[in-house]
Image: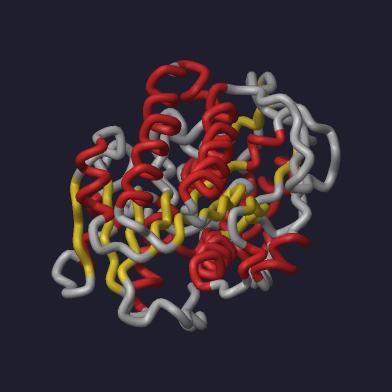
């Protein structure tokens, strides 16, 4: 957990975290409040949970607005008096977008545009938003560098790319400073292991703890740049506090700069969970077909973020998985 992080420029400021009851959003809320920053949380609890923020509800520094980014009036209300926006609200998941492209577009594009308009009208100083590594699409280049993308492979990927295009237009046309962070398979505490669209790490952890066989899509060779939550918290905070003017109105990879195959990931999870329950070592892995819209390999270059934002990841994949497993064991 990030205990201390230099937040020069945020003293006495107000930060709006959209999707603040979700996985990444609630972690951002926690670290901001821990540094005595005024926080407004906007969430409709469609994918977030009240229990993620329940301990902050009585804080004088915390305000909860239960509402939807698809409502422009709600977005205007949330942005009043706000200095910085950390926009995390979205409908995630490639499979969800394939099953329901209309709702994904309404939230991820329509809701995003509402937030940009509201931030512009409220004269917000900076708008930092969750972009996605899915924007790289069918580009086979490794590592992924920000200026080279391919053709999107899912409705979700299209929506996240459109976000970048809108942010750029709002920067050049209206003077709203924006920074996009292309998240690469973020994982860690509070990531929901339940539901049809649960991410692979919390899902596998839950299954292994229940002595159920995790199912890998494909042969296990597909690889991802799994990125621990504390690294993502750091880059978000760097993005809203940087005084480097050349860092503004750009997109950055939010990753660790290493890749792990699904087979390696499962091995790490079993190793760390076995410390709590030796029987988990005997649980077998099963295999199924590759998922539609999945890319084979994902690996980020973090050179641009290191140079422009002074981003320095603190957690490797293995460090992060060990901490995440400890959290799940105590909280599931």
Image side of residue 262 versus residue 283, left or right? right
Q: Residue drawn 46% across and 48% down?
A: 174
Q: Quadrant of residue 218?
A: top right
Q: Nearer the viewer, residue 152 or 76?
A: 76
**Does 243 sit above or below residue 154?**
below
Q: Is residue 322 visible?
A: no
From this viewpoint, which residue is outermost toward the right? Answer: 141
Q: Nearer the viewer, residue 308 or 233?
A: 308
**Does 245 sit above or below residue 206?**
below
Q: Is residue 64 visible?
A: yes
Q: Quadrant of residue 111?
A: top left
- The percent coordinates of residue 5 (x first, y second) are 50, 80
Q: Quadrant of residue 108?
A: top left
Q: How is the image coloured?
A: secondary structure
Q: Residue drawn 37% across and 53% down?
A: 332
- The percent coordinates of residue 231 (x first, y second) are 59, 65
- The percent coordinates of residue 79 (x first, y second) are 28, 54
Image side of residue 186 versus residue 61, left or right? right
Q: Residue drawn 43% across and 26% down?
A: 104
From this viewpoint, which residue is outermost toward the front? Answer: 173
Q: Residue drawn 50% across and 57% down?
A: 177
- The percent coordinates of residue 57 (x first, y second) are 17, 64
């Amino acid at each position: 957990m990030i205990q201390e992080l230099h937040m020069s420029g945020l003293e006495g400021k107000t930060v709006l975290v959209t999707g603040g009851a979700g996985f990444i959003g609630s972690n951002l809320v926690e670290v901001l409040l821990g540094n005595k920053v005024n926080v407004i949380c906007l969430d409709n609890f469609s994918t977030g949970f009240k229990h993620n923020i329940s301990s902050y509800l009585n804080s004088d520094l915390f305000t909860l607005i239960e509402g939807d980014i698809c409502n422009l009036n709600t977005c205007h209300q949330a942005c009043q008096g706000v200095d910085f926006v950390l926009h995390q609200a979205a409908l995630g998941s490639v499979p969800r977008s394939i099953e329901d492209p209309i709702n994904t577009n309404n939230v991820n594009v329509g809701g995003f545009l509402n937030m940009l308009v509201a931030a512009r009208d409220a004269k917000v100083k900076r708008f930092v938003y969750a972009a996605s590594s899915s924007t790289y699409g069918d580009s086979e280049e490794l590592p992924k560098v920000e200026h080279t993308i391919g053709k999107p492979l899912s409705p979700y990927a299209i929506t996240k790319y459109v976000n970048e295009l809108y942010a750029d237009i709002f920067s050049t046309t209206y003077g709203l400073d924006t920074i996009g962070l292309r998240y690469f398979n973020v994982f860690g505490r509070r990531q929901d292991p339940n539901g049809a669209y649960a991410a692979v790490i919390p899902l596998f952890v839950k299954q292994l703890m229940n002595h159920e066989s995790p199912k890998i899509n494909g042969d296990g060779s597909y690889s991802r740049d799994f990125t621990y939550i504390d690294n993502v918290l750091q880059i978000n905070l760097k993005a809203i506090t940087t005084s480097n003017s050349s860092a503004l109105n750009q997109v950055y990879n939010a990753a660790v700069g290493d890749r792990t195959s699904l087979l390696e990931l499962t091995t790490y999870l079993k190793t760390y969970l076995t410390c709590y329950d030796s029987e988990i070592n005997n649980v077998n892995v099963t295999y199924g077909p590759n998922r539609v819209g999945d890319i084979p390999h994902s690996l980020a270059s973090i050179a641009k973020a290191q140079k422009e934002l002074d981003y320095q990841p603190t957690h490797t994949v293995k460090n992060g998985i060990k901490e995440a497993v400890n959290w799940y064991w105590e909280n599931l």
